[in-house]
Image (cartoon, grey):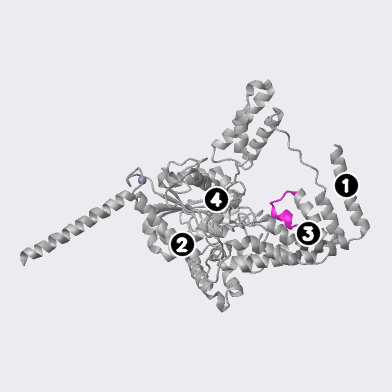
Amino acid sequence: MKKNFLRVISVCLCIVLMASVGAVGVFAADKRTACGADCAYYPTIIVPGLGQSSVVVLDDDGDFLLDKDGNKISAFPAYIQTKQLVKRAFFPALLSLLTQRDAGLSNAVADAIGMSFGINASDLYAQNTGNVQVEKFPYSYAECNDYERGIINSHIPFDLYPTDLPLDHLYYFSYNSFGNHIDIVNELYTYIQMVKVQTGHRKVNLVPLSQGGTVVSAMLDYYPQVSADLHKVLFVVPALDGSKLIGDVFNDRITFLDSDYLYHGFLEDMRLLDEKTAGLIEVLLRLLPDSVIINSLQKGVKCLVEDVMIRSTSMWALCPSGDYPSAAERYLSSPEMAAIRSQTDRYYQAQLHARDNIQTLTERGVQVFCVAEYDYALINVGENWNTENADFIIQLDSTSMGAYAANVGETLPEGYEQKNTHCSDPTHHHISPDHVVDASAGLLPDTTFYFDAQRHDLTQYNDVILKLAMELIAHDDITDVYADPAFPQFNNGRNVKTILPLLSQAKDVDAAKLSGDKAKALTDAIAQSEEVLSRTVGAAGEIEAAEQALTDALVNAGVVKANKKGKNIFTPISEWLYAHYGTKSFSEIPRAAVRNVLQSITDFFRKTAHI
Ligand SMILES: [Zn+2]
Ligand SMILES: [Zn+2]
């Protein structure tokens, strides 16, 4: 009996031992990192923003659809099939032009939107119905091939900004920006567990960018235990309380459906087109009566919002908590929307808890940093575009977790004292040098970095933000905004997209072939650019000044041609038309006036051709 008992025990022990050896074997085999799980770095997972994952179109057989150059076709933000669109819209547009009424144009516009954005539509359970595939990387950057690295670098240029973090510790989590939010959150949680197994490390860093902030925020609420897996979280312009832009769109507060604004001010306020192009478009809009234009836009917006956006729970996660109840009432109160509503209601709760959940994270010893940008009014699509400080895409209150700020172009009142909602150190000064932001009202006043006059969608061209991020993901030396004078709490926005190629072009010029003056101007301009780029702190406008010096020197050296800015006649014409005839189309304006406009345009082109 005793023998048998011992035998059973020993057999059991053997099984346990074998199983554990086996488990270790499996675990060790999965440890792909060179460090053998024993290094000072933490695996870091990027959770990208809107449209920063590659989502591609498939054909009916499930193979990649390719363009004429053999490249995969992106489904973000839409799948544009030019030929089909022309086929659908050409005759209704022509007929509407000839008859000066809506001869099917508005329906054609709605169909065109449907044909293009339909690829990102979802069913009544918020599952994508389009034939698309997200290109995922369930392995580190070190294991990505050139094509995959190209995708990652096009969004976050690791190739331009090297980090000390070993590349086998760097991961990029892809997801569909129009996808099912809860599924994406579940996938991220699983992905974190996978990274732990692959690297052998027990904790990881997370870098949620923009929309990625909503994914991480939801994960903290649905999986509170994830805090044990985290070493550091670096939020970069996170949409933690959504974007007022979406809040306005989901509440039917759209600016450009007002013809007065559309014909006069909308395109200039948008700040994406140069004045001349904006003026030209305003003049062209008068080819049709404004009722036809507005009707077409209205149907297009309705199609985009009702057929695509309101069935996407990822889009709903971008709706601010203050705008959600009324928007949900408007679009999700019918019984057929109940399945979507239960998912968006769940996220709404996570959104309301976001700041508390992040607070809990810090109390559990996770380091949390944030980068916020300000002094750029929201793009003017929603009626609330200029009611509070923002970064063009998201209001500052959302990205900074509650910082108090004056609106764009304004300053805090004279004698304003910082609120100290979240900072208890009386020696800390958290008001921005331009007297616009009070960082002490934000949840993380000592670990949030602010960039003035920085556009959200151009963040990847701010070399300082990238250098800061590369430092934070590799090391723990920067503990707060006071730790490194190279990265102060308040800094200037910048955009190095143009200066970097210009600088390498200038360096390629053989100065020996230039005259003394020209060679010196070029050398000086190169030195000026390099000096500015070597610093992470500096004055606003320095990059633009260095860029201009480089351009001038290159033009002077005969390497590039001077960029002549053509005279803008369209803005004055558009303004004259608006002042005299409001939003009337050419067909509603007296013939003589139309002749005058045509004459001045013809004269302009004749003169330009003559020159
Ligand atoms: Zn390691
Ligand atoms: Zn403080």
Mark positioned earlier in the residue sequence (3 or 2): 2
Q: Are marks 3 and 1 in contact (CB under 8 Å)?
A: no
- Asked if the residues shown at circle 3 and circle 2 are in contact, with their CB atoms under 8 angstroms apart, the answer is no
**Whole-percent x and y of residue 186?**
44, 62
Query: Residue 234 bears which disc, if any?
Result: none
Chain-order first, disc 3 or disc 1: 3
* Residue interval drawn in magenta: 263-275
Residue 425, given in percent of the width and then of the height, sits at: 46, 54
Q: Which residue is mark 1?
A: 602
Instruction: Determine which residue is flagged by label 3.
Output: 263
Q: Mark 4, residues whose alpha carbon is within 10 Å: few (<14), some, or many (≥20)?
A: many
Q: Position of residue 174 (x, y in %)?
A: 49, 55
Instruction: Report the side of 371 relative to 476 (left or right).
Output: right
Q: Residue furthest bottom?
A: 335
Q: Amino acid at mark 2?
A: Val
Q: Earlier in the sequence, mark 2 or mark 1?
A: 2
Q: From the image, tell me which residue sits under label 4.
A: 450
Secondary structure beneath dot 2 equals helix
Q: Which residue carries the number 2 mark?
A: 185
Residue 43 showing in the rendered view: yes
Task: Identify the element where label 1 is drawn.
Answer: helix
Q: Are marks 2 and 1 in contact (CB under 8 Å)?
A: no
| Residue 92 falls inside the magenta stretch | no
How far apart marks 2 and 1 lie (CA) works out to 58 Å
Q: Amino acid at mark 3?
A: Tyr
Q: Along the polypeptide, which appears first: circle 1 or circle 4?
A: 4
